[in-house]
Image (spheres, rainbow, N blue to C red):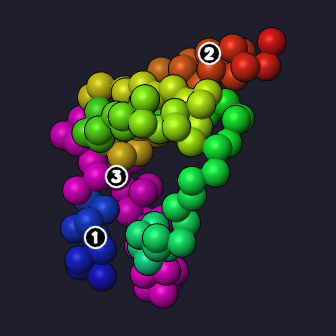
Amino acid sequence: MKTRETMIRSMFVPTTSPAIQDHVLKMMLGAPEATAAGAMAAMFDPAIRWTDVIKAPALEVVAGTGQVPDVQKTREVLPAFDAMQLAGTGHFLMLEKPAEFNQRLSEFLNKIMF
């Protein structure tokens, strides 16, 4: 459990509010160990990788601590892919900067729906 807590805490940035940290820790540490282990195993399972081209629009909003993927390389399988980064956020960017996250998501949805 301590290792899992350390991993979760590594996803926060100094500006992540204590309320968000408490919420995320309670939620993620409340999951059974088998659920957490299964989620990690699935994330790194090579069987989830694909090479089929998917033509649907896709957006990745990357945390400030993350790395924006190679957009041109990603467009080989997702031709309508775009990515952007929210500075000053950790892994839980949608909780840390909800207004900015929602604005960017709304802009993307408006672009593809209307």
- Name which residue type carries label 3: Gln
Secondary structure, mark 2, is: helix
Relative to 59, 24 lies left or right: left
Secondary element type, mark 3: helix
Position in image of residue 24 (x %, y %): 42, 57
Residue 78 versus residue 25 in the image, above or below: above
Image point 73% across, 20% down: which residue?
Answer: 112
The mark closer to the camera, 3 or 1, is: 1
Residue 59 lies, in percent from the top left, at 56, 31
**101 or 59: nearer the eye?**
59
Q: Earlier in the sequence, mark 3 or mark 1?
A: 1
**In the rendered structure, does residue 31 fall within the stretch colored magenta?**
yes
**Measured along the vertical axis of the image, is residue 110 above or below residue 65?**
above
Question: Which mark, by number, is residue 107?
Answer: 2
Distance (Cα) linking label 3 and label 1:
11 Å
Name the residue beneath numbered marker 1. Answer: 5
Locate residue 28, reporting x and y percent: 44, 67
> Which range of residues does the magenta coloring cover?
10-39
| Of marks 3 and 2, the one in the foreground | 2
Task: Tell me which residue sits at (80%, 12%) in the image.
Answer: 114
User: Which quadrant would the N terminus be assigned to in this image?
Assistant: bottom left
Which of the numbered marks, if any, corresponds to residue 83?
Answer: none
- Residue at image x 69%, y 14%? 111
Q: Is residue 97 visible?
A: no
Mark nearer the viewer, 1 or 2:
2
* Residue 93 position within the rendered picture, expressed as x and y whole percent measured from the top left: 41, 37
Badge 1 element: helix
Indicate which disc residue 21 carries. Answer: 3
Answer whether labels 1 and 2 touch (C-beta < 8 Å): no
- Mark 2 is on which residue type? Glu
Q: What amino acid does circle 1 point to?
A: Glu
Do callouts 3 and 2 mark residues in contact (Cβ within 8 Å)?
no
